[in-house]
Each structure stands twice: as structure tokens, then as C-alpha cells.
Amino acid sequence: MIFNRLKTFLLLISLSGLILAIGQIFGGSTGLAFAFILAIGMNFFSYFLSHKLVLKMYKAQPISKSQAPGIHKIVESIARKAGIPKPKIYLIPSEAPNAFATGRNPKNAVVAVTNGIVNILSKKELEGVLAHEIGHVKNRDILVSTIAATLATVIMYVSSMARFAMFFGGGRDSEGNSNIVQLLVLAIVAPIAAMIIQFAISRSREFMADETAAKLTKEPKHLATALQKLEDYSKKIPLKLGNKSTSSLFIVNPFSGAKALSLFSTHPSTQDRINRLNSFKF
């Protein structure tokens, strides 16, 4: 847990450092300040409203205690152990088994599950998955992801400015010296680096949520078997709702069984997660 917290901190520092380097290349231009303001505005909106948008995107509906007493009982018990308010529970009308958590803070948190996940997991496995999602809430991963997205957006925007400058024959500093090579690196390398760092933060937070779930349930093996089932079913029944840009929200990538390069994956490999969970001793 400490390692992953430190890793997240260092990755956020890396994103910040990349922005400072970009500022140096541009000589402290007002474009960088404008990019910051634009990114903060965009992600401020996302932070406060994205949970409503994503629930609507997946046609998720609130599910009452009378409709799903078992799920409510599990969530209530785990939330109490985690020391956070009980999240609202939503159901996604899909047979693709998966789950995600959203909401800007523990008081406004939502845990959403699909019909499919309820049908294929045992009670203990479902408890492990719900504990993972509550782990995201407890660890304030929506906030961390928003900060990372804000920094990455700044980098993407300024990189676009660099490409625009090169296209129109820019690339000289205030003294008239050519800095076309720096602009080229900025335009091509910076956005790729920002994406890699942002995805690394996402993977780190998944490991943290797994560990939090293991500590809350004291039975990590059940989350491990649940992850294997979800991985297998994602290849057979990909999610048809929503958008691939939201794949990082889910406990496993719901859209395809195809494996992405690890550097460009929002999730750690399922086998690495399983091995790590099986190594925990309580």
C-alpha cells in the first residue's frame, strides 16, 4: 500500500515536472497558463458531474434494499469497516459481468454492478469485488484520477500548440534562435509520456484497491477467483454499452479480451493482480 501511494505521488510529480519542462521550452509563454486554466475548468466539471454522466451512459438505475438485500448488506458491512458512508448502489442492465465505483468523495459515492456479475459470482467473490470498489472510494481515486487527467490535459493541449507552431513556421525563441528540435520533441514525445504516466497511475490505484479489499475482507483469494472469472467472461461477453474511454472505471477492462501493451493499459494484468492477492497473508 505504501509503495503504491509513493508510486502515485512520484508519477504525479513526473507529470508536473513534464509541464515545467514544457514551460521552459516555451519560455514561460501565456499559452501554458491558458492551458492550465482550460484543463482545470474541464476537469472541475468532470469531477463534480462525471458520475451522473457515466451512470446515464451505462443506463444504470438505483437499486433498493428490497430489490437486492444481499448486495446492500455486503456494501453496508464493508463501508462500515472502511469507515466511510454507505455508497449508493446502481444496477447496469448488461449481462457482461463487471462493476465500478464513481463519485467525487465518500459522501457522494456510487457503486454500480451489472446484472451479469451478480449471476456468475459467489457471495464471497461478489464481496471481494464490492470491497475493491469501496477501496477506490476510500482511497479517493476519483480525485487522484482527476488531478492526473488535468495535468495530462495541459500537456496534450500545449503539445497541440507546438504542432501548430511548427506547421506555421514557428520554432524560434525570443533571441531568434531555432528551437525546432525542442518543439518536435514536445509535439511528439510529451503527449505519449503523459499518457504512459496517466495509465501508470491508473494501474497503481487498481493495485491499491485490490489491497484495500483484501484488508477489508481478510479473504483475498475470493477477489482473486472473481478477477479470473471476470477476465474470462470479458472475452466472451464484452460490454456493449458506454464508451471505451471509461474503461479505467471498471474492475477489469469490459470492452475487449485483447491485451494492450502494458505501458498503455489502464489496468495491471489480471494474472499479476491474482498473484499479488494470493501472496497476502492475514
Image (cartoon, helix red, strand yellow):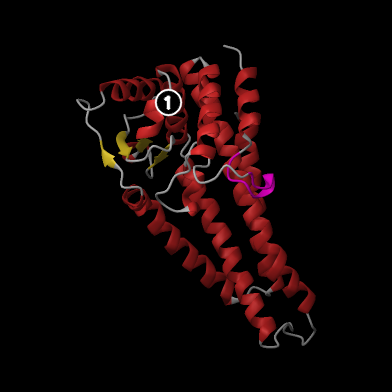
Q: In this view, does 136 lie above or below 239?
A: above
Question: Among all residues in the image, which is located at the extreme left?
Answer: 66
Q: In this view, does 59 lie above or below 89?
A: below
Percent x, y of residue 11: 64, 47
Of 195 and 26, nearer the camera is 195
Residue picked out by circle 1: 120
* Residue at x 41%, y 28% (from the top left corner): 130
In magenta stretch: residue 260: yes
Which secondary structure, mark 1? helix
* Residue at x 49%, y 24% (from the top left corner): 213
Q: How crowded is mark 1: few (under 14 residues within 10 Å), some or many (20 or more)?
A: some
Percent x, y of residue 264: 65, 50
Quarter-of-image position of residue 179? bottom right
Question: Among all residues in the image, which is located at the extreme top?
Answer: 282
* Residue at x 43%, y 23% (from the top left corner): 121
Percent x, y of residue 53: 34, 53
| Segment tinted magenta in the rendering | 259-267
* Residue at x 46%, y 21% (from the top left corner): 125
